[in-house]
Image (tube, rainbow, N blue to C red):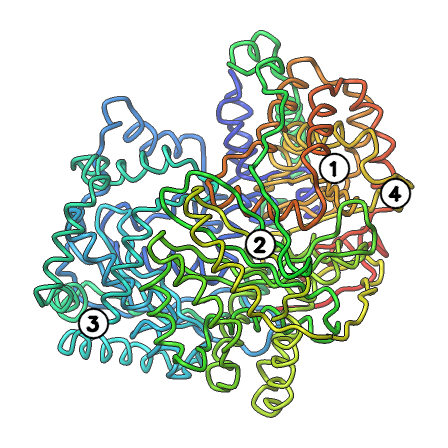
Amino acid sequence: MQQLLAELLKGSLATYINALTYPDRTDLRNLLDVYMGNLSMSGVVLSEMEGVFSSPDKLNGILIQQELFRDNAYRFVSGGDPQDIPNLTFDALLEPVHATHYYPSGAGSQGAAASDVSSPAGGTSGAVPAGTGGGPPKAYCTLSWVLAEDHLDFPTELAGFFLDYMLIGTTAAPLYKTLIDSGLGEAVIGGGLDVDLRQPTYSVGLKGVEPGRCPEVFDLILTRLDELRSGGFNASTIEAATNSIEFQLRENNTGGFPRGLNQFLRALRSWLYGRDPLEPLQWEGPLEELKAALAEGEDVFGPLIASWMLDNTHRVALELLPDSGLAAERAAEEAARLQEAAEALGDDGLAAVAQAAAELQAWQAAPSSPAALATVPTLRVADLDPQTIVIPTAAAPLLEGSATRLDHTLDTNGILYLDLALDIGGLPPHLLPLVPLFCTCLTQMGTQRRSFVDLTEYLDQTTGGVTSFPLVSAHQGLEGDPRAYIMVRGKAVAAKAQDLLGVAAELLLEPRLDNKGRFVQLVLQEKAGLEQNLVEQGNSFASTRLAAQSTVAGWASEVMGGISYLQYIRGLASQVQDTWPQVLAQLEAIRAYAIHHAGALINLTGEDNLLADVAPAAARFVAGLPSGPRPSEPWNQTLPPESEAFLIPTQVSYTCKAADLYQAAGLPYNFNGTGSLIVATHYLATTWLWDSIRVQGGAYGAFFDYDLTSGQLTYCSYRDPGLLSTLDDFDKSAQFLAEQAASQDTLTKSIVGTVGEIDAYMLPDAKGYTALFRHLIGVSDEERQARRDRVLATTADDLKQLADLLQIAAEEGRVASVTSKSAAAAAQAQQPGLFDRVEAVM
């Protein structure tokens, strides 16, 4: 009977909320009240919140806010608590929440009532489910404050940004470094200053702490804050923070997020609480006043530390400890609740709920009428630019062709963007797992002339930031020939462009790799970050795992960023103390191979005069890289082709299915149907997959992607209460394409959406980097234009003809799922042999 209930009512809270607007069906709503009030969380509640409550980092933030704001609306979780959501009824949604707060005259509400800042300090603890595959559970220890009774004025807020940056804004910041150097935990948490609520807050702490040692962490934070209050910050720290924050404000780099919308949201943050919306946008005056006060020696930050933290009793000390028995305890509670619901409903009740659920699902699946769709404004294909966007690029060989320089003349507001690609394509394969940490070491271990603290401050004083990371991709049309590089990216204003090149030379030619203690800290931080990402972005790990079974590039990416990499880092964290000489030798081997002019490429983006000014220095920089022979080893590895489940403590699943169309279907690279296949990914993601997996299945998201470089077709779900049902929906995509002809309206929207993704918003730095990436993997503008032509010419018949390809993926594709032990076991029981391998990774 429990199984029957789970099958009948496998939707999510999204299903229930949709039912609230189901026209003229009070009886259906009443049945669904029973449904929500008596059934378990599993497969019923909103998957997004299940994912949030499965993440210790996110749950930590939720508990902090609940404890800081016990007496106002901020104590409530906006998405709902998974344990309480099943109790929701239609009347409870309308009264008092909707009727009381959602009305036109309330649109100008100034947020929650203020919480009294004089509230006493408190301590609290919480628990989150833990698995068995990641070692003994470790605690999260966070100290948090409510800083003021109301929204801060902008000058005070700006001073707060400075203080936050100097406390924990970099790994060399005094409070951040004190916490890491203590050895009490693995990574700094908390997020620092938060001014998005009416009342600003501050949180900081450590995760990966031995249970029972949180009081030591809290005492350490308060002691270091007291030292900084009385002793102040070094002049170099203040200068670094000033230059870094001013660069960020002037550059206004919003990444892929539109600048205009970002400005609006900045204004809204003040306007929402009754203040001048233009105040946050007019930052130059307050910045100059703050800089002048600092130049005159005024103690700006000591009083803030005292009033906001040391003398502030509205403080919470939170200890969150993962509990390996909590998931089983909750599962038992759910099982009992299911049994009680089944007995209360009886056969007639079950039949009524089944009928109601079927009606609801039919209503959800019914397409909108043409008349309704016609009311939605949309572009036409004729409105789209038929020409592909070309990024200006000029290439010049350096050092007799062994290196290359690419220039992109763009309006960058006087900023030089530098990208350096160092070829590691022949690096001995056993060294690859260490490459990401080597990249981190370049900017986080110091150099022969500067400690890592001095280096961090120097970077902030002279540049807008420098980062390093590995980049691996298949080459367009060349199977088994991956492109692999260590990337070094930096930016600086025109006056300091020469300094940026000097910094890059210092990082690459004079790295300090022999600081064992610092390296251990970096390993632990990397481990903590990977474990957090696995819980919150399991779909990325699952899709990377599948790509590693198809191509060498996919394999290399997996050992430098996937499940294999996490396992390597865990082993390194426990062994580095005993194996440091071997690890250091491997780091030096990577440096000797990677820091070389052969195959190097320097990519410069800026105004024409700026590029001309730095061209000689760029040539000297490349000429200064080591030369000479370097033996290389071929990469020919892939992971075994198998379906896998990776177990973590979670209430949701991240499930992917993939197939290599170049191999499975024998397709040539860039076959004639590529343009239509790209449109099909958008079409399916916004129709069939959206309706079946998100709307009806309750997953927070469903994705469909086709990788032109590798030929891999990949389906993925995100924060998904289902597993087998999701795989079934993936496989039915072929049938949907074959049987459901796209209407002209839907086809047009899919083409428009596809072109929107192709022409995604990019700022100058992103344009320069995108052009570099295309150069590295062999994508020409002519090829992009041909593909765009095929996209624009896609017809409904073209989509139908792709059904056979999707059927191949359904029959020959492999599965990877980051999921719970119970979900994997249930799937394996219902479909024996689904997973070739099941492994607990947390």
Q: Earlier in the sequence, mark 2 or mark 4?
A: 2
Q: What element does badge 4 sit on? A: helix
Which residue is label 2 attached to?
Answer: 537
Which residue is label 3 attached to?
Answer: 235
Residue 461 percent location from the top left of the image:
31, 64
* Residue at image coords 23%, 67%: 238
- Residue nearest the viewer, comparing 368 with 278: 278
Q: Earlier in the sequence, mark 2 or mark 3?
A: 3
Which residue is label 4 attached to?
Answer: 811
Q: Earlier in the sequence, mark 1 or mark 2?
A: 2
3D distance between C-alphas at marks 4 and 3: 65 Å
Q: Earlier in the sequence, mark 3 or mark 1?
A: 3
Going by the numbered disc 1, the residue's amino acid type is Asp
Of tags 2 and 3, the one toward the viewer is 3
Residue 143 percent location from the top left of the image:
30, 68
Whether residue 348 is visible, yes or no, is no
Above or below residue 462? Residue 682 is above
* Residue at image coords 73%, 34%: 783
Q: Tell me where residue 236 sits by quadrant.
A: bottom left
* Residue at image coords 80%, 56%: 481
Of tags 4 and 3, the one toward the viewer is 3
Above or below residue 792? Residue 82 is below
Residue 326 percent location from the top left of the image:
53, 66
**Classed neighbour count for the residue bearing mark 3: other residues with Cα under 10 Å, few (<14), some (14–19), many (≥20):** few
Q: What element does badge 2 sit on? A: loop
Q: What element does badge 1 sit on? A: helix
Point out which mark residue 729 bears.
1
